[in-house]
Image: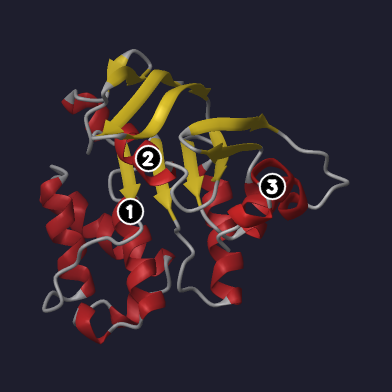
Amino acid sequence: MELTIDRLSKQFQNKIAVDRVSLRLSPGVTGLLGPNGAGKTTLMRLVCGILKPTAGSVSLDGTDVSAEEYRAVLGYLPQDFGYYPDFTGLDFLLYMSALKGLEKAHARRRSRELMDLVGLADECKKKVKTYSGGMRQRLGIAQALLNDPKLLVLDEPTAGLDPKERVRFRELIASLGRDSVVLLSTHIVSDVEHIAGRVLIMSAGQIVHDGAWDKHEDLERFYLAQVGEGGYDG
């Protein structure tokens, strides 16, 4: 399985947000770091087919990002995902399952399984508006996993989680990377340091580093060396 990003660009009026990015991503966790305004979220939206590129292409095993078959194996957690406050947590997952085209019986089983996985089984009948920020983030992670995605795009997945929860979700994300292509964007450098086998650093719409880093060197220090002290957004 391979995600292919070929000379991908996105321009908004006079600003080039993503500038001729080419990447090939295989199963595993790839961390995406960069300062605010570097183009990380735009790149992830292009990978998810939410935005149309100005130039270039995105495909998974030759299937274009615009195809239904691509969307069927995509899981996405945006930085600010929308939810319906009067839905219960379980109802929200069932609703998202319907949008993803899951069969009803499977959707109910999968939704309950995921509520348990993210530690919300006891709160599944409570309305989302009563959830804390961390609980809503866990619900967001659950909805991204509903269709057992082969491509998982996570934008700040551990935001709002306490340190203990963050460690738990690092382990979950790492396990998902065994069989899926996982693209993880975060300002929490330690998340990437612990679970990503490959690190992308983005600045001014371009990838300025792609690969590993010297494990004897602190990743945050390495990151700052690539983008400069003024680029740190953590």
How far separated are the C-alphas under marks 3 and 1? Answer: 23 Å
Q: Earlier in the sequence, mark 3 or mark 1?
A: 1
User: Going 35% across and 83% down the picture, which residue do you hit?
Assistant: 132
Residue type, label 2:
Met
What residue did someone put label 3 on? 223
Residue 83 occupies quadrant: bottom left
User: Going 29% across and 31% down the picture, which residue do you hit?
Assistant: 11
Q: Which mark is residue 44?
A: 2
Label 1 with label 2: CB-CB less than 8 Å: yes
Secondary structure, mark 2, is helix
Residue type, label 3:
Tyr
Image coordinates of residue 91 in percent, x first then y, are: 15, 68
Residue 222 located left or right of residue 157: right
Q: Nearer the viewer, residue 46 or 101?
A: 46
Q: Nearer the viewer, residue 63 or 33?
A: 33
Residue 212 occupies quadrant: top right
Outermost residue on the front side: it is: 14
How far separated are the C-alphas under marks 1 and 2? Answer: 9 Å
Secondary structure, mark 3, is helix
Compared with residue 214, is residue 97 higher up or lower down, i.e. above or below? below
What residue did someone put label 1 on? 78
Mark whose residue sits in front, 2 or 3 = 3
Q: Which mark is residue 147?
A: none
Q: Is residue 125 visible?
A: no
Compared with residue 115, is residue 46 higher up or lower down, i.e. above or below? above
How far separated are the C-alphas under marks 2 and 3? Answer: 20 Å
Residue 57 occupies quadrant: top left
Q: Is residue 36 visible?
A: yes
- Colour setting: secondary structure
User: Going 28% across and 44% down the picture, which residue do you hit?
Assistant: 147
